[in-house]
Amino acid sequence: MRRYTAGTAILIGGLVAGTLDIVYAITFSALRGTPPQSLLQFVASGLLGQASFEGGPATAALGLLLHYLMMLLIAAIFYGLSRQLTFLVRKPIVWGPLFGFLVYWVMNLVVMQLSATPVKWRFIPISFATGIVVHMFCIGLPIAWFASKVPADRTPQEAQA
């Protein structure tokens, strides 16, 4: 079985989750007529507000960077929790999707509401359903899976043996 360091698990988990999520978001938005640049500018609007939509490719690039930074932070949070609540990594297929479900609600009902983005969360059935599924299986699951590949810390007694 392949093992990772904490940093590697966080990095790979965050990048995989971030890539799956952004591919979904760009595809879903494109099907609804929103170009990728506008979607990424929307992400940047969390920091810059309405001005992000006037920044062209530069604010789209900032949006992509912010997206991946958020995913790395989410992966680090899960990893930190999993070192205290070890059951999270014993069954990543169970706890990863539940973590992703929680991430969906925190991102939409806390982070977006406190951000500078001009559009706040509203209930749209298809966006809600796909958003929940993507957060569970494309964000929570890969993050938990890679975190589960980090060996548990050895106890002081094991280290001395």
Image (cartoon, helix red, strand yellow):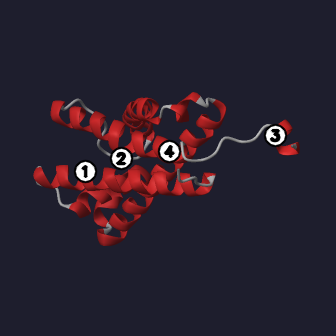
Residue 158 is marked as: 3
Per the image, the residue denoted by label 2 is: 117
Q: Earlier in the sequence, mark 3 or mark 1?
A: 1
Q: CA distance from mark 2 to mark 4?
A: 20 Å
Q: Amino acid at mark 1?
A: Tyr
Callout 2: 10 Å neighbours few (<14), some, many (20+)? many
Q: In the structure shown, which secondary structural element does the residue marked by tag 3 occupy? A: helix
Tell us which disc is closer to us: 3 or 2: 3
Q: Earlier in the sequence, mark 3 or mark 2?
A: 2
Q: Amino acid at mark 4?
A: Ile
Tell me the residue at 16%/34% (across/down): 126
| Residue 13 seen from this side | yes
Q: Amino acid at mark 2?
A: Thr
Is the residue 75 above or below the residue 123 in the image?
A: below
- Residue 74 coordinates in the image, percent (x, y): 50, 44
| Residue 49 seen from this side | no
Per the image, the residue denoted by label 1 is: 24
- Residue 27 coordinates in the image, percent (x, y): 19, 54
Q: Earlier in the sequence, mark 2 or mark 4?
A: 4
Residue 74 is marked as: 4
Residue 41 is marked as: none
Tell me the residue at 84%/38% (across/down): 156
For the residue pair 71 and 56, the one nearer the viewer reads as: 71
Q: Earlier in the sequence, mark 1 or mark 2?
A: 1
